[in-house]
Image (cartoon, helix red, strand yellow):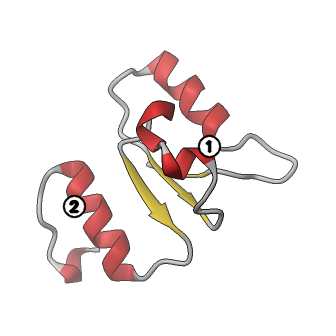
Amino acid sequence: MILDWIIPGGMGGGETIEALRKLDPTVKAIVSSGYSNQGALANYRDYGFVGILPKPYKIEELRDTISRVLGMDLPAEQV
């Protein structure tokens, strides 16, 4: 799953991944944010994420990140 780090007025990625890890410690989550210098993007693994996707991103970056997280290569037409 892809979680945004900051959700104004809502539950952000840090809180969400913490809750998800309690339900399923093996969940694969990617953190995404336009604030690339925030803690989660600089140290994303410390927060329980397995990948990062700084905003703005291109479809190719999305595909590559998902491919790395899933451990496979996805053809561009499948993303």
Secondary structure under badge 1?
A: helix
Q: Is residue 41 left or right of residue 6?
A: left
Q: Measuring 50% from the left and 16% from the top, which residue is drawn there?
A: 22
On screen, residue 61 above or below 68: below
Q: In the image, is residue 27 above or below residue 42?
A: above
How far from the left and from the top, in percent, is residue 49?
43, 40
Instruction: Specify the amino acid type for callout 1.
Output: Gly
Q: Is residue 5 left or right of residue 78?
A: right
Task: Quickly name the residue at label 1.
Answer: 13
Q: Note whether 49 is above or below 66 in the view shown.
A: above
**Mark nearer the N terminus (1 vs 2):** 1
* Amino acid type of the residue tagged 2 in the rendering: Ser
The residue sitting at 47% across, 23% down in the picture is 21
- Give the residue drawn at x 22%, y 75%: 78
| Image position, residue 55 (x, y; %) | 56, 72
Residue 52: image location, x then y, percent:
43, 56
Q: Position of residue 3 (x, y in %)?
A: 55, 50
Residue highlighted by disc 2: 67
